[in-house]
Each structure stands twice: as C-alpha cells, then as structure tokens.
Image: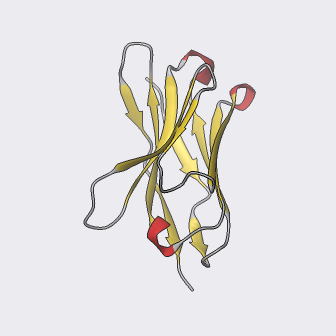
Amino acid sequence: QVQLVESGGGLVQPGGSLRLSCAASASIGSIYAMGWYRQAPGKQRELVAVISSGDSKKYADSVKGRFTISRDNAKNTVYLQMNSLKPEDTAIYYCNAVDGLGRNYWGQGTQVTVSS
C-alpha cells in the first residue's frame, strides 16, 4: 500500500506559478511511475504529467512548455512546477502512483484555481 498526500494548491492569478508536491508513504524508487492528473468541474479526469522510475517524462499537450514534473527519491516526493498558469488550468489536481504490479494509488487531491 502506498499513501499519497498532495500539497501546494491554491489561488493564483493568470500568468502566475505554483508548485505542487506529492509525498508518498513508501519509497518511490520502487514505484513504476508517478504522475499528476486533474479534473475540472463537469469534465473527465485527465493526465497532466507522468514520470517513470527511469526518469522518463510525458506531458499533456496543453501543459507542455509550462509544467515540469520531477521527483526526489530521497524525500519520496514528486513535484509539479506549474508556470504561466491559465484559467483553464483550474481543477483539482490528483497525484497518482502505479506500482510494479500495476496497482494504482491516488491522493486526495488539491485545488488549483487560476483567476484574477
């Protein structure tokens, strides 16, 4: 079992930045992949960014060039640096982990609101 706790959400003006953190209860070095998803009101949950145990990264087209995913294995933490935020980035952001057996784990979510 892996427990995930997100933090760092909040209210920011368009063009601003936020950094989300996801702290895992287990060593993330043994986790196959970790990622960030988001869900806006009335919309499906969508992938934002994912990072593999080998440090391979993938981003949604809508955030490429603005968001950066990274991991600190020593702290069992994954980060999502979000720059040049837009109102359409407003959503609940969820941390996800997939272990070597393909099991999915989710955090409770953190709200990000981009508004002037």
At horizontal 36% and vertical 49% (from top left) the residue drawn is: 46
At horizontal 56% and vertical 29% (from top left) the residue drawn is: 25
Report the number of numbered marks: 0
Is residue 11 depicted above or below 82 in this figure?
below
Give the left or right position of residue 20, taking residue 45 as reference: right
Which quadrant, please, contains the N terminus?
A: top left
Of 7 and 87, the residue lying toward us: 87
Of 75 and 114, the residue lying toward us: 114
Of 88 and 6, the residue lying toward us: 88
Give the left or right position of residue 80, taking residue 113 as reference: right
Counting from the top left corner in percent of width and height, residue 93 is at 46, 54
Counting from the top left corner in percent of width and height, residue 94 is at 45, 48
Is residue 85 depicted above or below 92 in this figure?
below
Counting from the top left corner in percent of width and height, residue 39 is at 36, 57
Q: Farthest residue toward the bottom?
A: 116
Is residue 46 depicted above or below 96 in this figure?
below
Counting from the top left corner in percent of width and height, residue 79 is at 64, 44
At horizontal 25% and vertical 66% (from top left) the residue drawn is: 42
